[in-house]
Amino acid sequence: MATAAAAPVNADETFRAEVRAVIAEYFPAEMKGRSMMLASVEGPLDETPAMKTWREAMGSRGWGTPTWPKEYGGGGLTRAQARILEQELANAGAYNPIGGMGVMMFGPTLLEYGSEAQKQEHIPSICRGEIRWCQGYSEPNAGSDLAALQTFAEDKGDHYLVNGQKTWTSGGQWADKCFALVRTDRSQKQGGISFLLIDMDAPGVEVRPIRMISGMSPFCETFFTNVAVPKANLVGEEGQGWTIGKRLLQHERTNLSGGGALASLNANSLSTIAGKYRGVDAEGRLDDPDLRARVAKFEIDWAAFLLTARRAAAESKGGGVSTISSILKKAGTKLGQERAELAIEIMGRQGLGWEGEGFSDTELAGVRGWLFGKATTIYGGSTEIQNNIVAKNILGMLDHQ
Ligand SMILES: Cc1cc2nc3c(=O)[nH]c(=O)nc-3n(C[C@H](O)[C@H](O)[C@H](O)COP(=O)(O)OP(=O)(O)OC[C@H]3O[C@@H](n4cnc5c(N)ncnc54)[C@H](O)[C@@H]3O)c2cc1C
């Protein structure tokens, strides 16, 4: 005799059923298995109607930013529910359509340091994936030594007048707004820096995309010439920008640690890829013992890294990030590079395809992920700078500096 499907047993299972129903109704099947990593900086917002419907379905529920407070448009989910959402998206081959710098770094920082009015103004549009943010930190003479930045915001009473130049502004040509570190006082280095929100279409903002050898222009030079910025756009106090800017970098580094080359190869585990491209023995093991050992070592290191990242998030205060983000960034980006190298080796010639019909998405992500992975140990603060931060702030070394 047929029995009715078992009813969900508790609130979490009820939530799981709800997530499955939303995915079944709104997730576009043609997008299955695609990674939307760094969606906001890869190119112009180029959504099909089905992708827009999916973004709106996720955004209206706050599920793109699952644990952010409901009052600002976030999902207000518990960690357990957020995990369920993550699991169900992965099981369905679906992606979170709401990302970019607003989600990864600016939003959590504004939730911690912004005024109530700033949170009401900016957080809901990030949760719905409607507004894209870019990062105005680096300058031609201020990269690793970020506090050397010179872009100046002059106090004009009710507004600041901003003049200067930023560089490597990822996605600057497609962004609506920029969170920028500017100098409001030339007499102090770190203490003279403030955190300012600038509209990218304000008069005096000019963006020049930097064209790379590949023909892509993922980042820009950004020039500010007499740009009037309302005082209401100052986050925190004048001169507090270094503290706020560093907190944002912790969010950035924590996010980047699991990104880059790893995310571009999305949910496929290395052993799954290896099983597909290389021979296996009668027991389903890779028959090349050397490759098998290296893949196994990677999978163990990666599992340990993910568990450490999860533990660090659970233990930390301040929106889930801390100085540990420097360790995670260093370790995660290095693992990402290792994985990309292994993936290309495993896929052989198929892993070297750049474009065209003869290559699957996973294969195309191979060489592109490998190349992009080179940037991961530079952006968000280079590996050498992470070593310095770990030595100074975690190990208590270099106190003489
Ligand atoms: C793909 C990509 C995207 C980026 N996107 C953005 C963005 O959106 N917004 C933004 O503001 N910036 C962005 N950046 C800039 C990035 O933050 C800087 O490139 C990075 O901080 C390094 O600065 P730099 O390039 O000036 O190198 P430099 O600071 O000149 O460093 C050169 C080399 O010297 C080493 N070095 C420097 N100082 C020390 C030291 N004290 N101890 C040991 N070694 C040291 C560095 O590790 C590096 O190897 C991006 C960079 C890349 C590659």
Image: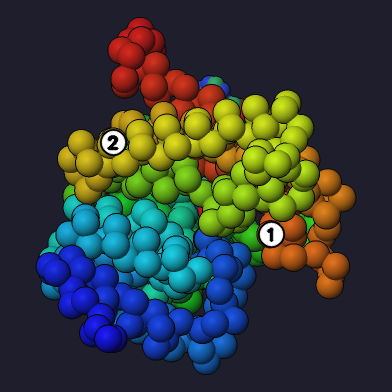
Report x, y in % for residue 339: 63, 40
- Assign the C terminus to one quadrant of the image: top left
| Mark-to-mark CA distance, 1 and 2 | 30 Å
Question: SS for tag 1?
Answer: helix
Of 231 and 338, nearer the camera is: 338
Which quadrant of the structure image shows residue 100? bottom left
* 147 over 366 or under it: above or below: above
Which quadrant of the structure image shows residue 209? bottom right
In what quadrant does ligand 1 lie? top right
Q: Which residue is mark 1?
A: 362
Q: Which residue ends up furthest to the top in the rendered image? A: 400
Task: Note whether residue 144 is visible.
Answer: no
Q: Which residue ends up furthest to the bottom in the rendered image? A: 49
Q: Residues within 10 Å of mark 1 (few under 14, many from 20)?
A: many
Report x, y in % for residue 324: 33, 31
Which quadrant of the structure image shows residue 327? top left
Left/right of residue 160 with respect to residue 333 in the rendered view:
left
Q: Is mark 1 within 8 Å of ligand 1?
A: no
Tell me which residue sits at (28%, 36%) in the image: 311
* 329 over 5 or under it: above or below: above
**Camera-nearest label, 1 or 2:** 1
Give me the disc on residue 312: 2
Kind of residue at badge 2: Ala
Tell me which residue sits at (27%, 86%) in the image: 1
Report x, y in % for residue 31: 57, 77
Tell me which residue sits at (35%, 17%) in the image: 392
Question: SS for tag 2?
Answer: helix
Task: Note whether residue 353 is visible.
Answer: yes
Q: Earlier in the sequence, mark 1 or mark 2?
A: 2
